[in-house]
Amino acid sequence: MGHGSYYEEETSGGVALLPELKEKPYILPPFHVVLIDDDDHTYAYVIKMLRELFGFTYEQAYELSTEVDNEGRAVVDTTSKERAEFKRDQIHAFGRDDLLDRSAGSMTSVIEPAYDP
């Protein structure tokens, strides 16, 4: 029988009040939102997208744009799986780069576990 944050346990000498045993909640692992490089988007586009979708400063967005350009990819967010999926979808919906005629659509983004299970 529960009594606040205690429960009763029958003992040979009567009833003892013990703290409730609480299971630790399972915490879902975080996911990375990874932006993938291509040649169909300018730095200006990437910086604008990162500032609008993630709230980065100009300097942060520029650093990430440089990382994407140099490394082929950059982690732009680490969050819950649901939010990672949402942010990936926002990147995919951002649209083409109007500064490049060859730009046919949005940049590519993937989500991946932030660490191996």
Image (cartoon, rainbow, N blue to C red):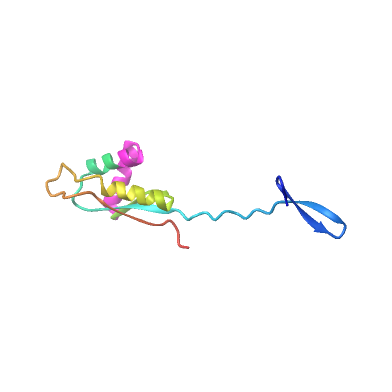
Seen from the viewer's position, the closer of residues 62 and 86 is 86
- Residue 41 placement (x, y as % from top left): 20, 47
- Residue 10 placement (x, y as % from top left): 80, 58
- Residue 61 placement (x, y as % from top left): 32, 41
**Is residue 13 shown left or right of residue 84?**
right
Residue 70, magenta (yes or no): yes
> Number of callouts in the render?
0
Q: Residue at x 85, y 55 (%)?
A: 14
Seen from the viewer's position, the closer of residues 54 and 18 is 18
Seen from the viewer's position, the closer of residues 57 and 22 is 22
Q: Main secondary structure of the magenta part?
A: helix
**Is residue 102 shown left or right of residue 21?**
left
Residue 83, magenta (yes or no): no
Name, please, the residue furthest toward the right: 13
Name, please, the residue furthest toward the bottom: 117
- Residue 32 placement (x, y as % from top left): 39, 53
**Is residue 66 shown left or right of residue 13?**
left
Seen from the viewer's position, the closer of residues 89 and 52 is 89
Q: Residue at x 29, y 51 (%)?
A: 68
Name, please, the residue furthest toward the top: 57
Instruction: State which region is magenta.
Output: 50-71
